[in-house]
Amino acid sequence: MAKILMIEDEDQIREEVMDWLMFEGYEVVGAANGRLGLEAAEREYPDLIISDINMPEMDGYNVLLEVRSNPVLSHIPFIFLTAHDTHDAYRAGMEMGADDYLTKPFTHTEVLSAIRARLQKQSQQKEYVNQQLDTLDKVLEEERAKRLVKSRLVAMFSHDFRNPLAVILSSATLMQKYEDRMDSDQRQNKLSRIVSSVEQLMQMLDDMLVVAEMESGRFEANPENLDLTAQVENIVDEFRAIKGETCQIRFESSVQKRVKLDPKLLRQMTANLISNAIKYSPDGGEVKVKIAGGEGEIVLLVQDNGIGIPDEAMSSLFTPFFRATNAKNLQGTGLGLAIVKEAVDLCGGEIDVTSQVGQGSQFRVRLPSP
Ligand code: ADP
């Protein structure tokens, strides 16, 4: 319950009002003059102050001035009690920042309703300020997250790029120096390491460019009338051409109609999901890509029978740079799914995942299609 400070030099009035308030359940502090009242305000930090005007040592106007000039107390609602029933006294009090004014003799009901009205207004203001603070917090949190992504991107440039570059340099130098001493297997091994490091660098560069674009707000949806089935099949064919030997990619679509979608965003979602499905599957694994049309939506499914995702990783999958523990020995930037999520959001869609460790994963994207 609210704490109320009652400053009044007439003992009888002070005690009577304090009794009324106590019976209403308020916590009440009394002070017999302005100086004691100000000390009590600084000590007790009340939710509301009721003060007489004419008092020895310090009058009510001076208490109000001190309260309003103290940043810790300045917001406290302040009600004057006075015997002056003149317009001038009323105006003087209100202009100095009093919130209300009660003229003696006042009734029990007048005092209580003035207090309730002030406390209610105060709590509405508090709520409004809290809402503003929450909004500010959210904006700051987003800014912080963006800054974190940026500094991770810089770290990736300066640190993560070094590893594949070092592999390329050492493999190429070895071949340059000792090519004549190497048998064909050793040469192939060095060349494969160079190719895979270059692929890794290209993937990092691609992901970084997309994330930088996302961060700068330049990533946006420009929908076109697409032959969805043909577009996705093209992407699947590109993967078959590169990864066909290690993985079977099945494609199925029941969507015939043209669909309004941004082709670039569709590519980001589909290619990243298929690339993950292949990467996190064993050699000889099978990846299924399926498109289906539902009520006002189209659904894209990418399913694999790979390593699966541990339960504790599920909630962080779409956070930039996150990688699950069971994925750490496979190359990756941790940016692919963040890009997928951003692309899905920009299309007004939703994405969900079901997965079981050692069994495989299924990513389902639902996109609105009126
Ligand atoms: P990356 O694959 O480069 O690590 P992503 O953002 O694409 O980054 O994926 C984040 C993490 O989600 C991966 O590191 C991996 O732990 C998990 N993940 C994503 N797709 C799959 C999948 N198909 N199977 C198993 N784990 C996956």
Image (cartoon, rainbow, N blue to C red):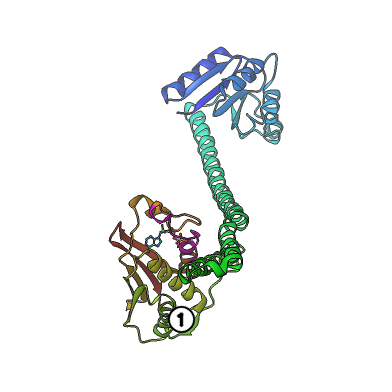
- Residue 16 shows up from this direction: yes
Which quadrant of the render holds ligand 1? bottom left
Camera-nearest residue between 286 and 184: 184
Quadrant where the N terminus is found in the figure: top left
Label 1 sits on a secondary structure element that is strand
The magenta stretch spans which residues?
326-339
Residue 329 falls within the magenta-colored stretch: yes
The answer to whether the beta carbon of the residue marked 1 is less than 8 Å from any atom of ligand 1 is no
Q: Quadrant of residue 232?
A: bottom left
Quadrant where the C terminus is found in the figure: bottom left
Q: Quadrant of residue 34?
A: top right
Give above or below for 228 relative to 109.
below
The answer to whether residue 43 is left or right of residue 311 is right
- Tell me the residue that label 1 is attached to: 260
Q: Residue at x 67, y 16 (%)?
A: 35
**Residue 243 image offset from top left, x and y in percent:** 41, 75
**Label 1 amino acid?**
Lys
The answer to whether residue 258 is left or right of residue 127 is left
Q: Residue at x 57, y 55 (%)?
A: 149
Camera-nearest residue between 322 and 370: 322
The answer to whether residue 140 is left or right of residue 341 is right
- Residue 202 shows up from this direction: no
Residue found at the very far front of the displayed protein = 181
